């Protein structure tokens, strides 16, 4: 694979790789480092990339594995990058509502991080990156039915945790 083919096939997925790394690592600098690491590994092995059915699937899998390795690393410091959370700013939304929405976003992020790794990964691919079930099947090797079950359980768990955290179930 030459430079032009690499640019056409790999560089368009950079944003997805970064968002995936950010989801796992919760730190902008670490996510950028992980993405650069994956791109460097892909470039180094560019001659073998034509053997893969989907280079994007390979890049996503490499990013996931690298992030999980970094999370398991004993030298990793627990840091979160709150600046990565998007602040909702609009003239039509009251400051009270802006705060409420920001609090909900923080809560959803925290609850997503508490999901089992597989559920978090599938939920991110489907609902954040908007991958099709077939694309997720290629990335994970799971059947579409398994993906649907995992996704359903992840969404239900997230919904239940969110309602419980907001004490909606108590009738308020």
Image (cartoon, rainbow, N blue to C red):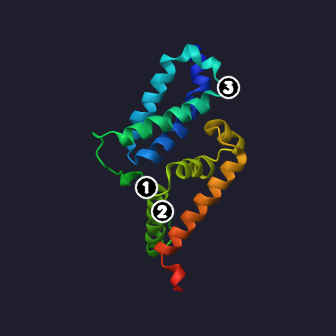
Instruction: Provide the secondary structure element on which disc 2 rests.
Output: helix
Q: Which residue is mark 2?
A: 105
Quadrant for residue 4, please give it: top right
Please name the residue shown 67% across and 49% down the image.
Answer: 146
Instruction: Say which of marks 2 and 3 sits in front.
Output: 3
Please name the residue shown 41% across and 51% down the image.
Answer: 84
**Residue 111 placed where, x, y %?**
47, 61
Instruction: Say which of marks 3 and 1 sits in front.
Output: 3
Q: Evaluate if marks 2 and 1 touch, with contact meaning CB atoms under 8 Å apart.
A: yes
Q: Which residue is mark 3?
A: 53
First along the sequence among labels 3 and 1: 3
Residue 92 in view: no
Q: Which residue is mark 1?
A: 85
The residues tagged by marks 2 and 3 sit, at their Cα atoms, a distance apart of: 36 Å
First along the sequence among labels 2 and 1: 1
Q: Does residue 12 sit above or below 142 in this rendering?
A: above
The residues tagged by marks 2 and 1 sit, at their Cα atoms, a distance apart of: 8 Å
The residues tagged by marks 3 and 1 sit, at their Cα atoms, a distance apart of: 35 Å
Mark count? 3
**Residue 62 placed where, x, y %?**
51, 32
**Residue 88 placed where, x, y %?**
48, 62
Q: Residues within 10 Å of mark 2 (few under 14, many from 20)?
A: some
Quadrant for residue 110, please give it: bottom left
First along the sequence among labels 2 and 3: 3
Residue 136 in view: yes
**Residue 55 placed where, x, y %?**
61, 27
* Quarter of the figure that contains the N terminus: top right
Instruction: Provide the secondary structure element on which disc 1 rests.
Output: loop
Q: Does residue 128 sit above or below 6 in this rendering?
A: below
Left or right position of 104 against 79: right
């Amino acid at each position: 694979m030459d430079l032009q083919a690499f640019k056409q096939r790999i560089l368009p997925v950079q944003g997805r790789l970064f968002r995936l790394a950010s989801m796992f690592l919760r730190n902008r600098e670490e996510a950028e480092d992980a993405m650069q690491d994956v791109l460097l590994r892909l470039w180094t092995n560019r001659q073998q990339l034509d053997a893969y059915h989907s280079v994007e699937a390979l890049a996503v899998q490499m990013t996931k594995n690298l992030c999980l390795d970094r999370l398991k690393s004993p030298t990793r410091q627990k840091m979160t990058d709150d600046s990565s959370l998007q602040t909702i700013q609009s003239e039509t939304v009251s400051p009270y509502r802006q705060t409420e929405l920001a609090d909900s976003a923080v809560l959803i992020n925290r609850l997503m991080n508490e999901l089992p790794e597989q559920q978090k990964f599938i939920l991110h691919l489907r609902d954040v990156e908007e991958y099709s079930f077939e694309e997720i099947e290629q990335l994970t090797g799971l059947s579409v039915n398994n993906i649907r079950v995992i996704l359903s359980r992840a969404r239900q768990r997230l919904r239940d945790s969110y309602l419980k955290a907001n004490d909606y179930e108590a009738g308020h």
